[in-house]
Amino acid sequence: MADFKVHQRDGEGVSVIDLKGYLDAHTAPDLENAFQKLLNDRKFNIVVNCRELTYISSAGLGVFMAFIEDVRKNKGDIKLSNMSPKVYNVFDLLGFPILYEIFKDEQEAVVRFRAQLKP
Amino acid sequence: MAAKAQKLTKTIESRTDNLLEVREFVLRAARVFGFSEEEASKIVLAVDEACTNVIKHAYQFAPDREIEIVIQPVKDRMQITVIDDGKSFNPSIAKLPDLKQHLSHYRRGGLGIYLMRTLMDKVEYKYAPGKKNEVRLTKYLTASEPSAQG
């Protein structure tokens, strides 16, 4: 049984990662692999949709920390969306809203990217 | 009338795929004790962080060592003790990081310890090098949450 799933969708200039299930020390490597693949493919505009993310621990949060610097060096960003209040609380406790843009809806994050991409 | 909360013990092998089982064990106990879903979630996360630290630091990912989790309800509070016999690590002597500075340097370590201290009312460490390490996490029931004790 898969308790955590990462699914990637590619739109125009923006890649969306859907997370499903729980993100802990056991499943964090799956997300690391997904981010690594995006970086290898030189896709740096990333929205992580957390609609079906039911749980996150610091091991999961650490993955976002591990990649954000490289992504931003390449003029991209990791934006987050659709968090449940429970998951948002953990991000908030660790001060992540200072570092990451968090949107209620995926589309808002995509629109933000598109606005930033305009010449 | 709520059932009397009892002392509960669980022993797992030091693998991250056992964290889910630990979380379910702690969640059940916290609910029985009378914690709200929000408070129970905090306790679950703190215990996950304690076990993850043991797997990473005390056992350095050796998969076949033991971690014992003891849940002890005491009147108005729940104490959860996570016990291992791996490498001693005493985070209580480490300075709590300045979170803003920590994040601005994209550091990913130390977040678990910060979370444990933030989520629980008390975090205590006891260790006997080469023998046994213990981290005890304590959470008090708030006035609005009826205790299941007695």
Image (cartoon, helix red, strand yellow):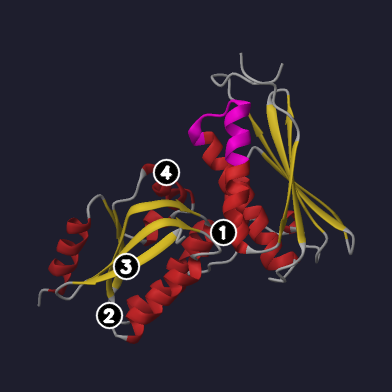
- Residue marked by disc 1: B111
Q: Residue A7 has which mark?
A: 3
Q: Are marks 4 and 2 on the same chain?
A: yes
| Host chain of mark 1 | B
Whichever of labels 4 and 2 marks the residue nearer the N terminus, that label is 2
Q: Are marks 4 and 1 on the same chain?
A: no
The answer for how far apart the CA atoms under marks 4 and 3 are is 22 Å
Position in image of residue B13 (x %, y %): 72, 60
- Residue marked by disc 2: A43
Residue B102 as seen in the image, left or right of residue A14: right
Residue B44 as seen in the image, left or right of residue A16: right
**Magenta part of the protein: which range?**
B26-38
| Host chain of mark 4 | A
Does dot 1 land on a helix, a strand or a loop?
helix
Q: Amino acid at mark 2?
A: Lys
Q: Main secondary structure of the magenta part?
A: helix
The answer for how far apart the CA atoms under marks 1 and 3 are is 26 Å
Whichever of labels 3 and 2 marks the residue nearer the N terminus, that label is 3
The answer for how far apart the CA atoms under marks 3 and 2 are is 15 Å
Q: Are marks 4 and 3 in contact (CB under 8 Å)?
A: no
Q: Residues within 10 Å of mark 1 (few under 14, many from 20)?
A: many
Q: Can you tell which quarter of the image residue B74 is in?
A: top right
| Host chain of mark 2 | A
Q: Can you tell which quarter of the image residue B7 is in?
A: top right
Which of discs 2 and 1 lies nearer the camera? The answer is 2
Does dot 2 land on a helix, a strand or a loop?
loop
Residue A12 as seen in the image, left or right of residue B142: left
